[in-house]
Amino acid sequence: MKKGKQKNTKKKIANEIMFNVGRSVLAVLIILGIFSIFMMKTSIMTAKQTELTLQSKAASNEIADFFDPYMRMAEQMSVNPQIQELLETSHEGDSLIEMENYETVFANMLNIANTDKENIMAAWIADIDANMVTQSDKFTSGEGWEFYDRAWAYCTKTGEVILTEPYVDASTGSMIISTVSPVYSPESGDVLGVAGLDISLAHVQEIMQEHKIGNHGYVVLFSTEGNIIYAPDENIIQKNVGEIGLSENVVNAVNSQQETFLKYTIGKTTKYGFTSVMENSGCMVLSNMPFMEYYFALIQMIVAIVALFIVGIIVVIISIKKVAARITKPILELNETAMKLAEGDLDVELVVNVENEIGELGHSIEATVARLKEYIVYIDELSAVLKQIADGKLAVELKNDYVGEFSKLKEALLLISSSMTEVLSGINESAGQVAGGADELASAAQMLAEGSGTQAAAVQELVATTATIAEQVQESKDGAEKSAKETQQVTLMMEHSREQMQAMMQAMEKIQQTSHQVVGIIQAIEEIADQTNLLSLNASIEAARVGEAGKGFAVVAGEIGKLAEESSKAANNTRSLINISMEEIENGNAMAEEVMNSLKDAVDAVERVNGMIQVTADNASDQAYNMDQIRIGIEEISESVQDTSATAEECSATSEELASQAAILKEMVGRFEY
C-alpha cells in the first residue's frame, strides 16, 4: 500500500513538472518555431524574389547588350554620307539600284553584313521618295511596295532607333528582328528614309535558353507589342501574351511595360516571376519558377524546424524526467520517513544528500525526529516512575537529562518522591511509637487486672503503680497528639505534591500551547510558500513575455514554485507530526491525572489515619480521666473491687484496640518503599 501511494505521488509530481515546465518550454519552442518559420519565409521569399528579379534583369540586360551593337550599326548607317546622299538625290519613280552611288552604298551595306554573318541576315535601306527598299543580299522591292505600310515606319516620327516585331524570314524560314534607324537630310533635316539590319533570333534563343532558374524555371522574352520572341515551348512563339493562358496580371504588366514581381498562373499551373523591361527597346523578359520549387526551400526548412522541434521536445521530456527523478527521489525518502513517524516508528534514518531546500527540509525532519526520540524517552521514563509511585515505590531515580519544559517535570517528580519518603518515614516512626505505647499500656492493664485481687493489701503499691500508669497514659496521649500532628503534616505535604502534579499538568498544557504556536508558525510557512509559488508563477509569466531572454529565468522560477509547493507539503507533514506529539502529551496529561487521583486517594487515606490517631488521642484523654477516677477509686477500693477489675479490663481492651490501630497504620505505611 505504501509503495503504491509513493508511486502515485511520484507520478503526480513528475506529471506536474512535465505539465508546467513542458508547457512553458513547448510554448517557447512553438513561438520560436513560428518566429523562425516566419523569418525564414521572409528571408527565403525575399531571396527567391531577388533571384527571379535578378534573373529577369540579367536576361533583359544580356538581350539588350546583344541588340545594342546592331542598333548602333543601324544608327551609324543612318548617318553614313553616301546613304544620305543616295536617299536625298532619289525622287519618286527612281530606282535606287540604278543611281550613280548605289554601288558604293551596296558595298558599304555588304561590308556591314559581313562583319557578323552569323547574326546579321542583311543590311538594308528604304527610301521614302522612291518608295523602295534594297538589301545587302541583293533583294530589292518591286512595284506595289509601300514604305508607310511597314511597322517600322513609325520610327520616322519618333526619330529613335527601334527594334521591330519578330517575324519569319520568307527565304530562310528563320525568326528575325530588325533594328531600324531614321535617315535625315544633313542640310534640311527632313526624313529621307530608314537604314536597318535584319538580325537572326537564333542566338537570342540560345542566350535565353542559358537562363535557367532553379531546376524547372526559365525566362520568356516578349516584344514591345507583347508577342513572344522566345519561350521553351516553341508552339507559343510569335503568339501574343493574351493568347497563351497567362493570368490577367501578367498580361497587364506586359502591355503596360511595368516592372513588377508577380504570382500568376499559366493554364492551371501557379508560378512566380518578375517582368523586366529591356532598355531602349521596349521588349520585356518574364522570369518564372513553379510554385513547389518556389516554396521548396521553405518547405525543407519547415520540415527541418519541425524535426528539430520534435527532437527538442524529446530532449526536454528526457531532461524533465531526469530533473523530476532527482527532485522526487529525496521527496519519496522524506515521505517514507514521515509515514513511519505517523505510524509511531521513530527508529528511522533519513539521508538526503541534496544541497537545496529539500535538503534543508530533510535536516529539519532529522532534527525533529531526534527531538521526538528524546521526548519519547522522557515520557517513557516519567510513565515508569509514576507507575512505581502508584505501586508504592517512592524511591525513584530519573536517569535522563531533561531539557526544556521537561526539566520541570523531573524536578517535580523528584521533589514528590523526596517529600513522600520523608512523610511516610515519619508516619512509620510514629506508628512504631504508638504500637510500643499500646503494648506497654496493654501490659499495664493486664497487670492491673491480675493485681485487682490484691488491691486491698497493696494500696500503697497500687498508688505508685497508678501514678506510673498515669504517666504512661499521659505519654500515650502526647504520642497520639504528636502522631496526629505528623499525619496532618503528611496530609499537607501530599496536598503540596498534588499541587506540584497540577503544576506539572499545567507545564504539559503549556507545551501543548507551544505546539499550537508551532502549528501557527508552520501555517505561516505554508502561506509564505503559497506567496513564493504565486511570485514564481508571476515571474514565469513575465519571463514568457520576455521570450528567449527569459527562458532560463522561467525554468528557475518554475523550479522555485515547485520547491515552494513541496515545502508547503513538508510543513503539512510536520504539522501532522506535531499533532501526533500533542496527542501523546494529552495521553501524558491523562496519566498525570490518574497519578493525581492516586495522590488524592493517598491523602484521603492519610486523613483517615489521622482520624484514627485522633480517636486514639481522645481515648488517651479518656484514659487519663479514668486514671483520675482510679485515683479516686483507690480511696474507695475497699468498697468496690469489682469496679476496679471492670475498669482494668476496659483499659486492657482499649490498649488492645490502640495496638490494633497502630498495626493497621504501620501496615498501610509499609505498602510504600522508601
Image (cartoon, rainbow, N blue to C red):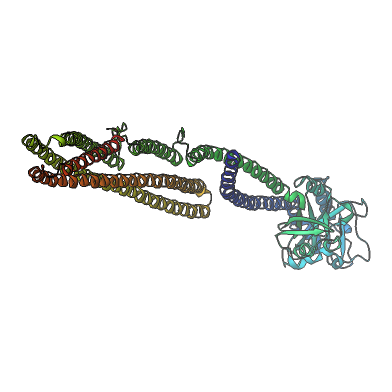
Specify whether 354 is left or right of 143.
left
Horizontal and vertical percent position of residue 216: 79, 47
Horizontal and vertical percent position of residue 63: 75, 51
In this view of the protein, which residue sits in the foreground, 495 or 580?
495
In this view of the protein, which residue sits in the foreground, 201 or 277?
277
Horizontal and vertical percent position of residue 444: 16, 35
Number of on-image labels: 0
**Is residue 614 in view?**
yes
Q: Which corner quadrant of the image does residue 274 belong to?
A: bottom right
**Is residue 80 in view?**
no
Residue at x 83% of width, y 51% of height = 201
Which quadrant is the N terminus positioned in? top right
In this view of the protein, which residue sits in the foreground, 152 or 422?
422
Horizontal and vertical percent position of residue 212: 77, 46
Q: Name the residue furthest front.
A: 639
Residue at x 65% of width, y 42% of height = 308
Residue 70 vertical placement versus 131 (above, below): above
Specify whether 154 is left or right of 16.
right
In this view of the protein, which residue sits in the foreground, 303 or 172?
303
Q: Name the residue furthest left.
A: 460
Specify whether 17 is left or right of 273.
left
Specify whether 552 is left or right of 642.
right
Which quadrant is the C terminus positioned in? top left
Q: Which corner quadrant of the image does residue 311 belong to?
A: top right
